[in-house]
Image (tube, helix red, strand yellow):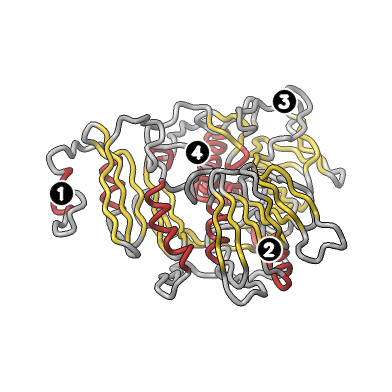
């Protein structure tokens, strides 16, 4: 087989890249190699601001992409850039003019045990559901988005949440925002706002996708066999050791020893401690240049150091001089942007046309939901790269909203918006425009003033 464009990976980055290629160069031959017959695609993107969208992700049969590309369900064993070919497990040799690697990332595993479940994809969630039918006590390890959502969704089980930081959800939230949400997770009271899903939901049976996505828990029952739900959080510690219980021990299945000296007895352990890029791809010739986080290094056009080979999504790490208010986090939103932008760069290289970098790389934006609250993160939302030289404006209404604005030299640098604040568009514009807010900073969060009137 031979293709003008070949994409490896059936996740969001790979499918977005294929969709972009089919749109930009409809007459070209496009191939997609995916290890599974199931792929993930963004089926709906509702614009919230200029750069931020509320996306819907659907797991679907890879065959549904056949109108745009030729789908090859196989595993790649090696790349031979000397002859522009990819070798697969089934013995195929597939030629390409331009190749894009969208192989994603794999979850970090802390211990190998039948009682330790690493949460990352649909299969692992189904395994957890099955185990919960007999579980009374669970240890959750991790402090990112999946661990946070998991603790909120679990019920009928005693939970010990082990976080390496001094506050929950440290990947996304500062201590103040964590405290705002923590009241909800620890109380689990009737006043907890119900999650309002504006996205469509999809049922998929027996499918194994590359990774979990937005609203992964919306159709999943995570209920144990205990009558009540109790949550204990162990802060500033990590797992030192996990030991399976003896067969004669009927009190639990596994023991978890923590670095703070405590030993926890539980039925299962759920691990959600981040990912490692799937960059260990065999290259016949000089290998890929890797960044310190093991991602494949790419330039401003998502090109690798290997000729005619691009990379996008979780597998890559940018080595260009990034914009002041953007940084990489291995999130679905960025995988989608990178996949689409990679298509633009590949077509530009084939047609010898200039390519302007996508505006999505100007500013970090992310929208998610924690504990039933809408969470929007903009720019340097945790004052990343600012050191200690910045100012914080804060407005908190317990159980309703949490607003934090980051200012430096009178200009907005980032924002954390929890709840229905309706100021995300204004904040995005102020970060992008770098308007001097010195004279109106005191009124920015005054609830009695419609601040948008200042900018009409």
Q: Secondary structure at mark 2?
A: strand
The residue pinned by badge 1 equals 443
Q: Which residue shows up at 43% across the image and 48% down it?
A: 173
Q: Which residue shows up at 75% across the image and 38% down it?
A: 95
Q: Which residue shows up at 32% across the image and 62% down it?
A: 398
The residue pinned by badge 2 equals 61
Badge 1 vs badge 3, beta-carbon distance below 8 Å: no
- Give above or below for 105 relative to 84: below
Q: Which residue shows up at 32% across the image and 60% down it?
A: 401
The disc label shown at residue 287, or none? 3
Residue depth check, mark 1 versus mark 2: number of the one nearer the observer = 1
Picture coordinates of residue 33, whole percent (x, y) = 72, 48
Reading the chain from its start, which is encountered first: label 3 or label 4? Answer: 3
Q: Secondary structure at mark 4?
A: loop
Residue depth check, mark 4 versus mark 2: number of the one nearer the observer = 4
Reading the chain from its start, which is encountered first: label 1 or label 2? Answer: 2
The residue pinned by badge 4 equals 328
Picture coordinates of residue 59, whole percent (x, y) = 63, 62
């Amino acid at each position: 087989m031979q293709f003008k464009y070949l994409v490896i990976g059936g996740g969001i980055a790979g499918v977005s890249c294929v969709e972009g290629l089919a749109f930009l160069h409809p007459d070209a031959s496009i191939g997609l190699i995916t290890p599974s017959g199931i792929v993930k695609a963004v089926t709906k993107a509702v614009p919230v601001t200029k750069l931020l969208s509320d996306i819907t992700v659907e797991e679907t049969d890879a065959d549904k992409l056949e109108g745009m590309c030729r789908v090859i369900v196989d595993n790649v064993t090696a790349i031979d850039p000397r002859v522009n070919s990819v070798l697969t497990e089934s013995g195929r040799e597939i030629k390409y003019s331009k190749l894009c690697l969208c192989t994603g990332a794999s979850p970090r595993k802390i211990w190998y045990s039948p009682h330790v479940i690493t949460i990352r994809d649909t299969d692992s969630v189904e395994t957890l559901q099955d185990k919960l039918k007999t579980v009374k006590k669970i240890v959750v390890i991790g402090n990112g988005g999946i661990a946070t959502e998991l603790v909120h969704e679990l019920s009928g089980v005693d939970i010990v949440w082990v976080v390496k930081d001094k506050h929950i959800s440290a990947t996304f939230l500062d201590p103040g925002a964590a405290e705002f949400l923590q009241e909800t997770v620890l109380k689990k009271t009737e006043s907890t706002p119900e999650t309002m899903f504006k996205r469509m939901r999809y049922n998929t049976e027996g499918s194994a996708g590359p990774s979990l996505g937005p609203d992964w828990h919306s159709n999943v029952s995570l209920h144990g066999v205990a009558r009540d739900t109790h949550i204990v959080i162990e802060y500033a510690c990590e797992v030192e050791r996990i030991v399976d219980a003896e067969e004669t021990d009927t009190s639990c299945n596994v023991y978890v020893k923590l670095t703070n000296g405590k030993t926890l007895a539980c039925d299962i352990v759920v691990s959600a401690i981040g990912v490692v890029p799937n960059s260990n791809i065999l290259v016949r010739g000089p290998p890929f240049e890797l960044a310190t986080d093991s991602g494949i290094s790419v330039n401003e056009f998502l090109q690798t150091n290997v000729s005619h080979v691009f990379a996008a999504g979780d597998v890559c790490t940018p080595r260009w001089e990034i914009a002041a208010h953007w940084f990489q986090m291995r999130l679905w939103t960025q995988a989608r942007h990178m996949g689409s932008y990679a298509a633009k760069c590949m077509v530009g290289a084939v047609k010898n046309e200039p390519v302007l970098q996508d505006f999505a790389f100007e500013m970090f934006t992310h929208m998610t939901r924690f504990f039933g609250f809408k969470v929007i993160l903009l720019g340097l939302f945790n004052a990343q790269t600012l050191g200690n030289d910045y100012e914080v404006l804060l407005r908190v209404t317990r159980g309703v909203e949490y607003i934090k604005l980051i200012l430096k030299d009178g200009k907005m640098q980032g924002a954390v918006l929890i709840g229905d604040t309706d100021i995300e568009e204004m904040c995005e514009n102020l970060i992008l425009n770098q308007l001097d807010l010195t004279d109106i900073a005191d009124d920015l969060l005054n609830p009695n003033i419609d601040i948008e009137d200042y900018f009409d």
